[in-house]
Structure formats: C-alpha cells, structure tokens
Amino acid sequence: MQIKATLNQLFSQALEELEISKTPVSVVEAGKPEFGDYQFNGAMALAKRLGKAPRQIAQEIVEALPAHPMIAKTEIAGPGFVNIHLDAGWLATALQSAVADARLGVGRKEEPIRAVVDYSSPNMAKEMHVGHLRSTIIGDSLANLLSFLGDEVIRQNHIGDWGTQFGMLIAYLEELGEGAEGSLHDLENFYKAAKKRFDEDEAFADKSREYVVKLQGGDVRCLELWDDFIDKSLGHCEEVYRKLHVNLSREHVRAESSYNEELAQIVEALKKKGLLVESRGAKVVFVDGDDNPLIVQKSDGGYLYATTDLAAIRFRAQELGAKRISYVVDARQAGHFKQVFTVARMAGFVDEEVRLEHVSFGMMLDKNGRPFKTRDGGTVKLIDLLDEAVERAKGAITQREAYSEEELEKIAEIVGIGAVKYADLSIHRESNYIFDWDRMLSLEGNTSLYQQYAYARIRSILRKYGREPEGELRIEDELQRRMALKLLQLEDVLHAAAREAMPHYITGYLYELSTLFMKFYETHPILRDDVPEELRQSRLLLAQATAKTLSLALELLGIKVLERL
C-alpha cells in the first residue's frame, strides 16, 4: 500500500468537503516520533488565501477528514501543523497481509508506460573502464525498478561503434591477419598499438583514412573486419556485465551505427522546420539562452554525437512509442543533453507528453579526491576492479568464519560485487564519491555487507525454527511499531525512487530498516525457551517481513543476498 497516497487522498477529500478542492496535497513523514508518523502542513499556505488563522483551517480540515482504519488520531500542533498517528492494529494487519504476498503488497502502476533506459554505453574501441561503472550500475537499477512497478522497459546500450578511429582499428586488424584474434584479447593494448602505427607511419595513416571511407560506403571486406572487431569487443563487455550481475546483453545493444542512414534525414527535418543555420560552413541550431549552438553537421559533411542523439530520440519516441526516455550519463554532459532535448522538441521529434531526462551522476574519486586511476596514472579496467573486489571480499569474510573453497568463491563474488554496486547506489547519484575498499566492505554503516549480514541472520533464525511462522503478527512496543511502519513504507520509497531516478532512496531506506531490525534482534529474543509461543510467532513474522523486504529491495538494485554469511 502507498501510505502517502492514501493520506493525500483523504486530505484531498477533506479539502473538497470544505470547497477548497484546487489545493495540491502532500503529507510528509514526521521528523520526530512525538509529531506522529506523518504531517499535513498545508494550513499555513491556505491561511492568507482564505483570510483565516492557520490553526482554524487545520481544525476544519481535521473535522472534515473521512474516517479510515489507518488513522488512530490527528492533532493540531504549533501554528497549524496536523500530526497524523497511524493505528498500531492497522499496521499489524497490513503488514501480515503484505508478508504473505510475493510482491510484499507493492502494486503495479495503474497507468504503466513504455520507458527506454539508455545506460552503460561503452566504446567498442576500448575495454570497459571505471568510467562506465556508474552508468551501468545506476541504469540497471532504474530499469529493474521501473519494470517491477509495471512499466514496459526497453534497455538500450548505445555503444560507440562508428567514427574515424574504426578505420585505424580495422586497418590494423587486417594487417595482423591470422594473429589478430589473440591481439583482441586485450583491446586496450590493441588500440594503443594501432594508434602508435597511425602516428608513426604515414602510409598506415592514409590506409586508415581510406578504410573510414570504405566502411561508411559499405565495403564488404571492411564491414567483415568491423563486424569481427565489434563481436570481440562485445564479448569483453558481456564478461563485465556477467560479473556485475547486470541485465544487459547483445539484444539490448542499439549502436551508433544503427542510426547512420537517418542522420541526413535529421538534418533535412531540421531544415524544413526552419531551425537550421549555417555557421562557418557547419549546420547548427541555436537554442534560446545558449550562446553556443548545437552543431548537427560539420563543414566537411560529417555528423556528430548530437545528430545521432537526435536520431535516437526520434526513433525511441516515434518508433518505440516511449513516454519516458532516460539517459544515464555523467553530469559533464548536462549542457549537451539540455540542448539535444530542446532541439528534439523544437523539431517535433517528441511530443510534450514524452519525458526526456538526463539521469546525471558525479565522478568516482580515489581517497585523495582525485579521479580514480591506476598507480601509474592509467585508466582502471573495469574487469580488473571487479576481480579485485572479489579478492578483497575473500579477505573480509574469512576473518569471520571458515568456508570451503567452493563456498568462499561463491560468497566472495556476491559480497564483493554487491559492495561495489551498493557503494555507488548509497549516495546521491549527482554527487562525486570516494571509492574506498575498507568502507564498502565494512560490516558497519550503510554498506551492502551490513544488509547482507542482517538478511543472513534472519534466515539463520528461520532455519533454526524449522517451519513457516503461522501465528498472528502483533505490535508489542514502539520499536516494533516503527519497524512495521518502515516495512510498510516500501512501496512509497520504490515509487519515489522510480519517479525521481534516485536509487539512494532505496539504500537509505534499507539502512534504516536493517538498523531497526538489529535493535529489535538485540532486545527481543525469538527462539529462547522462555518466549511464549504467540509472542514467538509474532516476532518471527516481523523478522520474516524484514528479510523479504531486504531481499526484494536488494534484488531491484541488482545485489544478491546470502542465506549464510
């Protein structure tokens, strides 16, 4: 159940009863327990408009509020705040119903849409590096979340597979002949070797430029070499995605090259709309409020990223019928996307009802606050970072318990990869964040390991009990009341995270929930012999609800849980 939505509806009905129906209603969670569970703070805003004292308006709203079993009482505080206290019996009944449901009571959207989430976007000329990590993790969690809530999600991996550098790479691939396959195992070194040849050998450079023309002209041999190169490059990407437990595969790839035939059409469409201006031989579109125009065709006739992005927007809106198009790209591209989105609307490529959003994110920094690099200043390969995460996880978990070699490998992979993903998703995505192995593999604080440990502890309790709890869930005290409320807030949190593309809402929620459970575990014995059976059943159900919530929310973030840790 969406508690906030229900309360908003009740207060809207009260305002309609008072003939104040055009006022938007938004209850908020109370800041302190003494202020109740939620608050309605709209009376102050209405006071000036209605010429009444805020407390008088608040009193009238409370009196007009429809009765609902959710609400135990309301009270007016301060200048006109309405404090809302939820009923403990209702919380217990609602939670027991939720825990019996596979979706924990989280409903699907009444009006689902088709959404495109564009994320990861590696360049086929190089292996994936740490610069691709945040887009891949954030984008995958957003796609998971939207899909769970009922939207039809189309994941798209807009890979860079076209452009002048590919003439150089194809020329080098052909030059190596039969030895090429072995060289492609390390794309980074392959690229460096090709670039060295290009810079030092003018004949090779000329051949590379010829290959660009041939490739763009559809030369069969060039296309064969290009296909082979892209195939090997995608193989590297898929290895990373498997390690990251990310739902991306070749079927999700929509490469830059797939829009090539549409680029001239984009320029022509902009021309017909009267938007195109020639500037220094280039074709550009000026956007109000921006001194620098959007360049869509260079003076030599070549196209740019902006042209391809406009073609992609038009395809996604008109061909795929998407109503929300999310680009999970770092914050440095904000100006680019602002211009592209504006021009796409000016050109009529998308209707006003289509939501275009740049899901921006900050940089990943080292402990010194500098961009994350290798010791010699090079770019960190993503596959190497993930392998290191697994190795470090082994050290963190073997300090606590002995495992067989097979168990250790499986657990270390889940812990290590989960730690990397959770560390990223636990901060506001627009912030830069410090990549710190010690912190992300800690059992203290808002970490993946803390959540996985809480889940594993509950599963241990349920295994020892040996059967499904089947009693009645009752709320004994304030701590359990807070736990029940927190568990029932899951749906509100998921909808807010999806609406605003903010995965850290979920990780923050999980940390609050697991912290409450740890306090509950320390103060409320469950399996001890002196605990009455009715009480035991109730506490088991509360623990089970917590475990199911942790598992579901972590799954949406792309993080696995462990039955034993």
Image (cartoon, grey):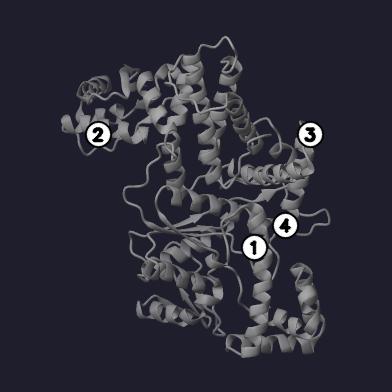
* Residue found 42% across the figure and 67% down from its top: 316
Q: Amino acid at mark 4?
A: Ile
* Residue found 75% across the figure and 42% down from its top: 408
Residue topped by disc 4? 383
Residue 327 point in image, percent of width and height: 50, 59
Q: Is residue 19 visible?
A: yes
Q: Amino acid at mark 2?
A: Ser
Task: Judge whether 288 appears above or below 556 on screen.
Answer: below
Q: Assess whether mark 1 and mark 4 are in contact (beta carbons under 8 angstroms).
A: no
Residue topped by disc 1? 238
Task: Judge whether 390 appears above or below 281 on screen.
Answer: above
Residue 399 point in image, percent of width and height: 79, 33
Rendered-image quadrant of the C terminus: top right
Badge 3 element: loop
Q: Amino acid at mark 3?
A: Ala
Res. 402 mark: 3
Q: Examine the image and state in which quarter residue 170 appears.
A: bottom right
Badge 4 element: helix
Residue 326 point in image, percent of width and height: 47, 57
Q: Amino acid at mark 1?
A: Glu
Res. 12 mark: 2
